[in-house]
Structure formats: C-alpha cells, structure tokens
Amino acid sequence: MRHANAGAAAVSCDAVFVQDLGLGERNFVTGNEAFASQYIDHHVAGHPRFGSVVMSRQNLPQCGRHLWAAHGCFEGAKSFATDALQLFGPGYRDAASADLPFGTSLRGVRLQHEAACAILQSGVRSLAPGEEAAWTFFGTFNPDHCAPSSDEDLARIEEEAKSALSAFAPSEIALAAPMRSIVQDALPLRCDLAGEAIHSTSRLHEEWRDGRLLSYFVEEGALNRHVVLREKDRLMKRRHGSILKTGQSLLPDENALSATCWMHGVFAAQLGGSALHKLFSVSRDAYNIVRTGGLRMLAEIAGEWRLLTLPSYFEMGLSDCRWVYRTESRTITVQAVASAGDSAFQWEIAVEGEPCRFLIFGQLVLGERDFNHAGIVEVDGEAKRFTFRPDPESLWGKTYPDAAYRLVTSTPGEAEALGGDELLFADGQPRGMPYIAMRTAPTRTFRFAVVGSMTDPPRRPGLPGNTKAM
C-alpha cells in the first residue's frame, strides 16, 4: 500500500488494513456468516518488528480440519481489531464512511462477535511534498492448525512472511480507474428525526434514553404495531427487522412466500418459499457494509442518487412494514405488504412534496443458495413486467418445472425503464451481474408486486410482447 503527497504542504497519514474472514466450507459460511464468525477464535500476539499480529482459527472443524490464518504488517501495526463491529458498527448503516477520523486509533481490544475481520492499523507517517510512504501487509494460511493459536506461532509466521517478501518481485502494472456503479457512489439519504410528532396521541410502552424517544407501540388491535426510531437502531449491534409471510397458515406451506425486511433499507431479503426457492438474496451483514443484498432502492434528490438506508422511523405490523424518510423537501414512505390470500408481496412508494425518480434493484438467486444458480429472466418492456423461471437443470427446475415468479406494476405509466445491471451503471452497459432493476420517472406514487406460482405455464414462442431473455 503506497501513499504519495502531491500537495504543497506536509501531510500525515496512516493505513488501515481490513480482511473479512470466513474460514469455513462455502455452505457453512454462506449459510450463516454470524454463526461461522462466532466459532472463529482470535489470538493477538506482539512481535518486535510486526507489532500486533492477528491469528484467527476456526474452532468448528471443517471436514475434520481447523482452518487458520494470521495477518500482520512488516512496518509494524500499532493497533488492531478483530470484528467489523469495532470499525464500522451500527453507525455505518446510514453513513458514507467508517467513523475513524485521522489521529484516532483502533482500541486494540480482541472481540469475538458476528463479523470476524483481521483489522490492522499502521503507524503514522509525515510526508513532505513529493515524498512517498509504503506499508506492506501480509497474510499466511494454514489449512489445518490442530492446536489453538499461541505466541509460539510467531516464529513460523515470521519465517513465512520473510520468505514471501523475498520472493516478491515488483512489476509495472497498468492502472485504470475501475468502473463504479451508481449504487457504489450513491451517498445515503440523510433524514430528519421525526421526534415526538409521530403518533403523538396514541403511543404506548414508550422507550426513552437521555431524553430521546427510541421506540413505542401503537394501539391497533392487540398492540400489533411497533415503531422504532432511527436513533435506537444506531445503538443496536443487531439490526431491527421483521419477517413477513403470505397466507394465514401457522405451519409451513409450499405456496407461502416469506421475506425479511430490515430497517436499514433492505425492503425484502431472502424473498422466496420452501417450494419456490429464493428470488432475492440474503442481506449478509448487520452494519449495511454490503449494500446490494436483497431488494434495495435509491431516490434521485437534487439531481443525485441517494441510497435509502436508515429511515426516520420504521413501523412493523403483523403483515406489513413501513419505512418513513423525512427530509427538508419531502417525505418518502415505502410500505411492504404480504398478502393474506395469495403468494404475493406488494410495495408502495409514496412521496409527500416534490416528486422524484427512484431506482429499484434486486440481487437475484433463483435457486436454493446465493451465487450458485442460473435462471431464466424475461423482461417485457411493453407490459412493464419481469418473469423469473428456474434453470431446468437445477433442483428447483427439476422438481417444479413450471414454477415462476412475476414482478409487475400497477402504475406502469410511472416506470421509465426495466432491465438488468446496465441500469446500475452511468454508461448503461451490462456487466453480467445478477440484478434486475426498474427506474421510474419523477413520481409521487409507484407500486409493484411479486407473485409466485408453481404452475405458471411457460411463454410459448410467437406470443406478442416486447420480451427479452437475460
């Protein structure tokens, strides 16, 4: 990692290295990242040259082996962390950067929580104009570390690190700015707190801290609506969310769909059913670090896209959720509703104030596991409709060959464009990523729904409609 001072005055800088850790078989890690992280044992040892060295061992055997990794810095790490909570944390859910201002050090405390990382912070360097500084971080891996980590591992780590450094040969690499998506560059939409004006006459079981209202219930039926304000979610290691399920059966039903709705702007994660399998992917971290899992939305504010993350408040019912984003110029409300009678979910976007455009996108699965399947996606631009079908060779396709999801809108006049990941890039070029997207015209109301069926007849050649396969 190299820094150069191109300015006219001296500057000081340091470097922070972050390595996400899985240390497990693929199905083990992707099935539940938090569970996998809880079994990773971290040991931090001090080395005369490398400073803090983070050793991480998977205590739950993977095919009989204990996977192990160690990370360090040749120039010396002055501090460390072992979980993403210590660098990102709840405050990152609606932030544009990690809360670690220059001059602030990581606390140097070992934490074994639910987002295992090897995080190292270098020492500070002062650079004169034109001067450069470089830090070299390293990692070493052992596929089966039988014994728990200890300081005795330092000698082998030092030997392997020095061997790797001596074998390293610098080479010229042609660098170019990577193509970034609209989602990567979009700042979070910052909301005003709604304060005591929310349901001010009907609040029950209020929760306050330091004079701030955090949450309460609303009297409706048997107290079945719960409201959480943004300030409470910022305090919680685990995010607020609700699981919605279609139908009225208390037992598993192959026709039922379910989805997890997360407060920090995930409007449907892991949407699917036991028979239909998943349409949209899982939201994989509690701090909104990965901002593409599940169904997400951006709003165009003053000519710039803003990602909908933490709302002013989040309202949960038995079969619906509402996200309310209050800003100076408008209030944006997104509501997700699970049908009591059909295998269907509906979302409604409502804007009070100046209308705006929305970019709605979902990361596709179309199978049992994320990143493991191919499916058939039909885009009907004329009818403003998506149809999703399983790969005929997949388990889902072989068991339910006529299964299908449809994504439709009851406000087709507001839909400006339907497509895939090309809508997520400013140049409009596809990159082959597993996304579908809808872009609206400036609007105050937009509604769309997902309907699942196990007996949907496949489209026959020659039927009318502007349809393309993805």
Image (tube, rainbow, N blue to C red):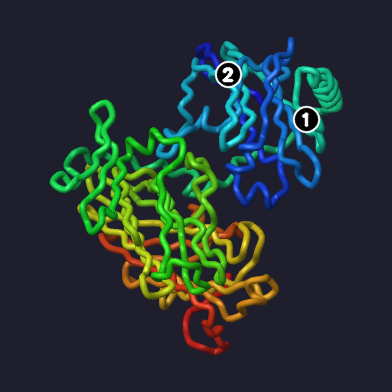
Which residue is drawn at the image coordinates 54% and 18% (left, top)?
A: 107
* Label 1 – label 2 distance at C-alpha: 21 Å
- The image's mark for residue 108 is 2
Q: Which mark is residue 140?
A: 1
Residue at 68 percent across and 21 percent down: it is: 44
Q: Residues within 10 Å of mark 1 (few under 14, many from 20)?
A: some
The mark closer to the camera, 1 or 2, is 2
For the point 58% across and 66% down, which residue is it?
Answer: 366
Q: Amino acid at mark 2?
A: Gly
x, y percent for residue 197: 17, 42
Q: How many marks?
A: 2
- Determine the image quadrant of residue 370: bottom right
- Above or below, 239 against 134 in this view is below
Q: Position of residue 68 (x, y in %)?
A: 75, 33
Query: Which quarter shows the C terminus?
Result: bottom right
Which quadrant, please, contains the N terminus? top right
- Residue type indicated by callout 1: Thr
Callout 2 secondary element: loop
